[in-house]
Amino acid sequence: MFDPGWNPLYGVPSYPAERYGVLADRIGGILQSRSDILLVQAEAVVALEAVAASLARPGLSALNIVTSPYGGWFGQWLRRGGATVRDIVAEPGLPIVIEAVAGALDADPGIDVLAVVHAESASGILNPLSEILALARDRGIVTVVDAVASVGGHGLDVDHLGIDIAVIGPQKALGGPAGLSALSVSRRAWNMILSDGAPRDSILSLADLKAWLDSGRWALPGTPAPLEFFALEAALDRIEAEGLENLVARHALAASATRAGLAALGTPAWVPAARASNLVTAVPAPVGLAPVALIAAAGRLGVELTEGVGTAPARLLRLNHTGQRAAFQTVLANVVAYGAALRQAGHSCDIAAASEAISATYSR
């Protein structure tokens, strides 16, 4: 008999406890990691704070690479736990320079932990991850990588790169729910986390989540939100059907086509392709034009452009081609709307040439 009070948004059955471990294994496959995979019942910024809270303690020395507000927060969380933190801050909206990292590590041989964001949705940049990790590996430093805005859009082989802790969120390139996150934790990282003073009895305690692993990965602590886990499972089904390599290639193609369209429009992208994210492409607003005005003009055409986060001096706009948006139709709409917004502001640009460049990139 039909129940008029039932609604699929709040009448979801419990997620089967035996499938949490299966989800973790599938995420491990995406990360190419044989380390422990933890599921966090919150958005990825909570997982990142949990990492900082679980590592930080007096006597710990950390090198924190800051290329967005998120990196700045991570340093604050480490300091709150008593760690000594040295921030290396990149120029606004730009990737970190590898020489700056090498110099900081050479100046302080006592660094225990290095933290870095792989790709930045805030500014559309890509940090030189493999080079940074090589420097840390040579010095025996535990590494923390925020891969929320890179997983699924860039290659990420956790074991090959030697990442100790990788944090991901499924809501970007993976096209999953925003209310869950996951992380990969190496044995070396566990040794540091579980040493004297590891926080317990907290949502920010990785040591508490280790108990889930040790008990056979059965029921997660707390009261899991079943809708989020069913959504994650569905997203992983879609990723596995498409193929991870194809997913990464689709994002790379969207980024390449966006850049080609912007170049033909007469407004080159913010950074070279090798230093750019495949999930969003940033472009600096022309001198004399406010990014918010261009965003509003594009919005009147039904296209959402956004302003760079924490990049005020650079005055960046972001064209989003993340997840299901990594497709020809969205890329074309983004660039054409940006061109139309420029025209409305009195700037000449060749929208037809931009459209042709995007079509040609996809045709190849």
Image: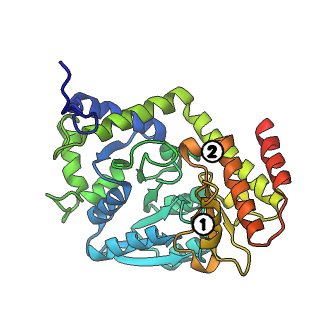
Left-right relation of 289 to 59: right
Q: Nearer the viewer, residue 357 or 43?
A: 357
Amino acid on which disc 1 is placed? Ala
Q: Residues within 10 Å of mark 2 (few under 14, many from 20)?
A: many
Q: Which residue is mark 2?
A: 251
Amino acid on which disc 2 is placed? His
* Measured Cα–Cα span from mark 1 to mark 2: 26 Å
On the rendered image, what quadrant is the N terminus found in? top left
Q: In percent of the image, x 30 and y 64: which residue is there?
A: 55
Mark 1 near mark 2, Cβ–Cβ under 8 Å? no
The kind of secondary structure element at disc 1 is: helix
Query: Is 285 situated above or below 9?
Result: below
How many numbered marks does the figure carry?
A: 2
Decide which of tag 1 and tag 2 comes sooner along the chain. 2
Q: In percent of the image, x 34 and y 47: which residue is there?
A: 180
Query: Is 301 situated above or below 33?
Result: below
Q: Residues within 10 Å of mark 1 (few under 14, many from 20)?
A: some
Left-right relation of 309 to 273: left
Q: Nearer the viewer, mark 1 or mark 2?
A: 1
Q: Position of residue 306 (x, y in %)?
A: 57, 63
Q: Nearer the viewer, residue 295 or 160?
A: 295
Query: Is 115 situated above or below 39?
Result: below
Q: Nearer the viewer, residue 327 or 168?
A: 327
Task: Give the quadrant of residue 347.
Answer: bottom right
Disc number at residue 168? none
Q: Which residue is mark 1?
A: 296
Q: In percent of the image, x 60 and y 66: which residue is there?
A: 296
The kind of secondary structure element at disc 2 is: helix
